[in-house]
Image (cartoon, rainbow, N blue to C red):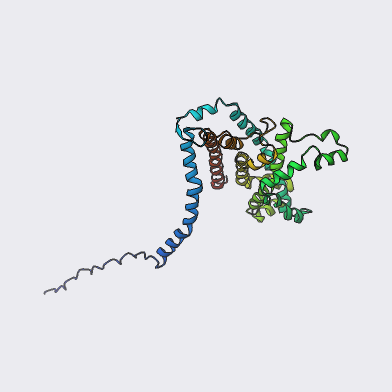
Amino acid sequence: MTISTAPVSDPVATDAPPAPTRRRRPGHAREWWLGAVLVLPAVVLAVLFKLVPLVRGVVTSFESSSGFGGSEFAGADNYTRMFDDPMVLTSFRNALLVVATLPVWIVLPLILALLIHQRSPGWKFFRAVYFVPYTIAPIVVGIMFRQILAPDGPLNALLRFVGLQPLAIEWLNGRYSALFSLVAVALWSFFGLGVMTYLAGLATIPEETLEAAYLDGAGFFRRLWSVVVPMLRPTVAYWSVLCASGVLIWLFPLIYALTQGGPGDATMLPEYLVFLTTFQFLDRGYGSAIGIALFVFVAVLSIFSVRHMFTEGTRKPR
């Protein structure tokens, strides 16, 4: 008996389906070029009015120049000269004194922002007027308060009227009262920006979180300290460093209109000293060196602010 076996056919080899190819949208390249064209004007302006002056300032800071004539390379003489210049040291000391008022700059806008956010009595009025001072040009604010703080100005007249004669002083002629007045006017001028910054931070706090804390029995101050303040920490850090750097950048118009650095050197701050050194004393190299030192200080504060914000924003809760 024979057994016939049918040939066993090999399994048919099937080709693997081709990998899907990623097709680019027809308009992708056009959208990229359109975006580049739209951004280009801003980039050009930033390069022309920020990067180029910065580079030129760095180059000038290593030169020795007098007036508007020629200049010669001076190495690091302008930078070493700053450490022996009492006016430079005084200006940075005054800046540190102003920075020491930072808690006031942080707390007062936060209080008003909380009142508006919680819709406390009068919140509509405060919401309508809090940003008005920031819309006034600082030079106009300085001229206005120079009249208000004059010896025979409205402020002293009001103090005399209510019987506070000893407080009716020459606000802009005393060493410490002039610096205090400058800080108070600056705080009034930039107060609205701080309130707006805090309101933006408060808007990011979920209402469910506050309601849960309320249902757990937490009172207003407990919710404020345990919920609102921790969740506002990046905003507080941002506003703190913005104020610290703004003290060294924003106050030039107010100093120019109110005190011009006086009396003596009581309100001399680095940015005003840069102006005097460059345009009054015509020492461009030294003025540029002071400006670069100021830029480095502000840059360090800004980097610290950004790092702190990202660290707090990405930190996982325990």
Percent x, y of residue 227:
66, 47
Q: Specify the farthest residue to the front.
A: 69
Q: Residue at x 70, y 32 (%)?
A: 263
Q: Quadrant of the C terminus?
A: top right
Quarter containing the N terminus = bottom left
Tell me if 302 is positioned left or right of 119 in this view: left
Asked if 52 appears above or below 19 in the picture, the reply is above
Is there any visible trace of residue 232 in the rendered image?
Answer: yes
| Residue at screen point 74% across, 50% down | 115
Q: Quadrant of residue 172?
A: top right
- In the rendered image, the residue lying farthest to the left is 1
Please state which of residues 158 and 103 is positioned toward the viewer in this rendering: 158
Residue at x-position 47% and y-position 41%:
56
Residue 42 in the image, given as x and y percentages of width and height: 50, 54
199 in relation to 106, above or below: below
> Residue 235: x percent and y percent?
62, 47
Number of marks in picture: 0
Q: Is residue 107 visible?
A: no
